[in-house]
Amino acid sequence: MADTLVRTGTTKRQMPAWLRIVISKVVSAVIVLWAVATVVFFLARLSGDPVSLLLPPNATADQAAALKETLGLNQPLVVQYFDYLGGLIHLDLGDSLFFHEPVAQLIGARLPATLLLAAAALVISLVIAIPAGCIAAVRRGKSTDTSIMSAILVGQSTPAFWVGIILILVFAVRLKALPASGYGSFSHLILPAVTLAIYSVAVIARLLRSSLIDVLSVDYIRTARAKGLGEGAVVLSHGLRNASLPIVTVIGLEIGSLLGGAILTEQIFAWPGIGRLTVEAISNRDFPLVQGTVLFFAATFVIVNLIVDLSYTLLDPRVRIEA
């Protein structure tokens, strides 16, 4: 970004670096969201005519034409596109063709279920991944490290939908200990949250192990050990803190992945969140709803990345924001 100078008389004051970074990030976010909105707008219309799904099979051509006019689908594609962008500028995502309700209202109604599922999956991920990564790093090359790395490899290589099906067969069908689907109680949350967390556990634990191994070999760690600090205090007080920068980055990205990855998990467990709403919108060729839900996921990624970028300076004083 070009330097921006503010002139006051004969003196020149440069815009603070943090403000230039924030402005640059916001501009980049707007460009990304515009690109996503444009791609989704045109891709959604390649899926077919939604009027054929909204009318009964014996509907006449006049009825189809009248419905197209009502929905604005009789307009040229370019006109529809600029109408859509104009709505976005005013934060209007339009109305659902199938549910006949504002898209923002539908997303808001499903948002609590998706946030609950993603938050539960993130808590499970951190509770398992942080101890596993630390133990693997401290016990590097030993059987404990090999066992943890093998489990990580399996978790990272296993598709979420397969994990979900296996969990349903074991805990719902065979053991009858947990419900296979539904929403409303803690027991309904366990299986979808574990399914969604498996991949994140593997990613975070693997990166933490690698980062911690690098940190534990530097001079100040050897100095801490020479002063008589226990291994636990060295790892937790000195190693984990200095290894946290890449971990924060990947955790931030995983929050976006958990929200986006909820599409399959919510469908498998009949979880009434935004992911399942997206699948329903695609099945119904509900253009405004598809565009709205995809924009929601894109905005989530952008906001999380921005927060992660700006949090660097709080975690590592060596990092300085420079434009």
Image (tube, grey):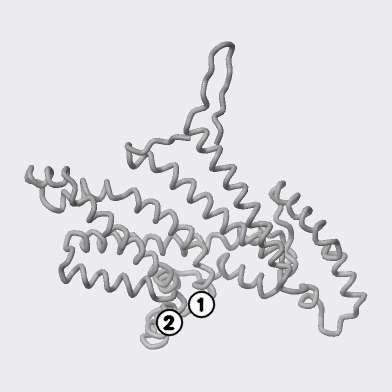
Q: Quadrant of the N terminus?
A: top right
Q: Which mark is residue 168?
A: 2
Question: Does residue 151 appear left or right of residue 217 in this picture?
Answer: right
Vertical position of residue 43 compared to residue 83: above or below: below
Task: Determine whether, in the image, residue 158 is placed left or right of residue 11.
Answer: left
Q: Residues within 10 Å of mark 2 (few under 14, many from 20)?
A: many
Q: Residue at left 22%, top 56%?
A: 213
Q: Mark 1 — residue?
A: 268
Residues 206 and 11: in front is 11
Q: Please tell me whether residue 79 is drawn above or below residue 181 in the rendered image.
A: above
Q: Which residue lies most toward the right here?
A: 62
- Amino acid type at mark 2: Ile
For disc 1, the neighbor class at 10 Å (few under 14, some 14 to 19, many from 20) is some
Q: Quadrant of residue 108?
A: bottom right
Amino acid, disc 1: Ile
Outermost residue toward the top? 10
**Disc number placed over residue 216 in the picture, else none:** none
Q: Secondary structure at mark 1?
A: helix
Which residue is outermost to the bottom? 174
**Position of 320 compared to 104: left or right?**
left
Q: Answer left or right for 46 relative to 30.
A: right
**Looking at the picture, how far across and down is residue 178, in whole percent?**
40, 78
Q: Quadrant of residue 51?
A: bottom right
Q: At x 58% / y 70%, what residue is drawn?
A: 276
Where is residue 228 drawn, in percent x and y? Answer: 7, 45
SS class, disc 2:
helix
Q: Residue at x 43, y 53 (%)?
A: 252
Confirm or deny contact between disc 2 and disc 1 (CB under 8 A): yes
Of pointers 2 and 1, the one earlier in the residue sequence:
2
Estimate the x, y position of residue 90 in percent, counting from the top left: 72, 47
